[in-house]
Amino acid sequence: MGHAGNNVIPNVHFRKVNGCQAGRKNRVFMRTWLDQAGRKKRRANNRKAKAAKLFPRPAAGNLRPVVHPPTQRYNMKLRLGKGFTLDELKEAKIPVKQAKTIGIAVDHRRRNRCTESLQANVQRLKLYMSKLLIFPKKSGKKGVKKGDTPRSELQSVAQNTLREIIPVPKPDLRIKARAITKDEKEKSAYKTLKKARTDKKYLGAKLKKAKAASGKAEE
């Protein structure tokens, strides 16, 4: 029986066989995941072993700053960065050499491009320092140094096992609708920008004119 129209003759090569033969012929292409539960248990055991090895330090490692990822696609999000800048440590009054010894990551390459991110990380550092407990390196009274936490406060210390020592804040991206105010209606963004461009364009001429006028006045 012929086909209607001048079409391509169907000649597909599906490797998946339908019916009772599927179990035998298609098993080669199936990938099982029978060790899923075992892997989950192994990862949990590895996390516990790592936390026990780092005790009493936080299981997540060093404290890291909150940064905005690069590119326009991701810069509205927040994530952990490599380390705190020298300016952030200076603002929080933490010496760079000391920061490395008390679990604070330092990145001398990163720069602060705005005041908001600087202050956010400074507050993060201050919160960390307010909760920090420093264990003496040696036992006995001679082993206690200046800045160490008293032994009475170190009796029942719980380890920080969070994925992030201080969770990354989730920014509220939703803005509730509100009525437009009278001042906002009267203002014009176009006129403001237009005036700024005009002032910038004629700034040199204005300065030149003012200088000439001041020269004549002195004469």
Image (cartoon, grey):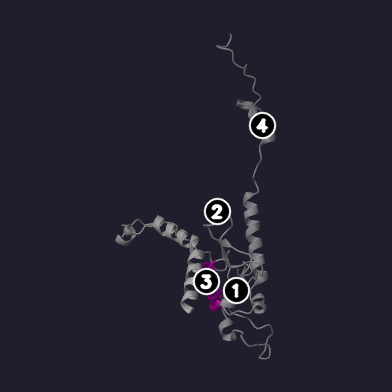
Residue 35, horizontal then vertical, whole percent: 65, 48
Q: Calculate the distance from the C-alpha at mark 3 to the C-alpha at mark 2.
A: 22 Å
Q: SS class of the residue under badge 2?
A: loop
Mark 4 = which residue? 26
Q: Nearer the viewer, residue 54 or 206?
A: 206
Q: Calculate the distance from the C-alpha at mark 1 to the C-alpha at mark 4.
A: 62 Å
Mark 2 or 4, nearer chain start: 4
Residue 147, horizontal then vertical, whole percent: 61, 85
Mark 2 = which residue? 72
Is residue 170 visible in the rendered image? The answer is: no
Residue 77, horizontal then vertical, whole percent: 53, 58
Residue 195, horizontal then vertical, whole percent: 42, 60
Q: Which residues are magenta?
A: 114-131
Which residue is at the far front? 219
Quadrant of image for the N terminus: top right
Mark 4 or 3, closer to the camera: 3
The amino acid type of the residue labelled 3 equals: Gln
Q: Is residue 148 left or right of residue 205?
A: right
Mark 1 or 3, nearer chain start: 1
The amino acid type of the residue labelled 4 equals: Asn
- Residue at horizontal 65%, vertical 31%? 23
The amino acid type of the residue labelled 2 equals: Gln
Q: Nearer the viewer, residue 130 or 6?
A: 6
Q: Is residue 183 left or right of residue 26?
A: left
Which label was assigned to residue 119?
A: 3
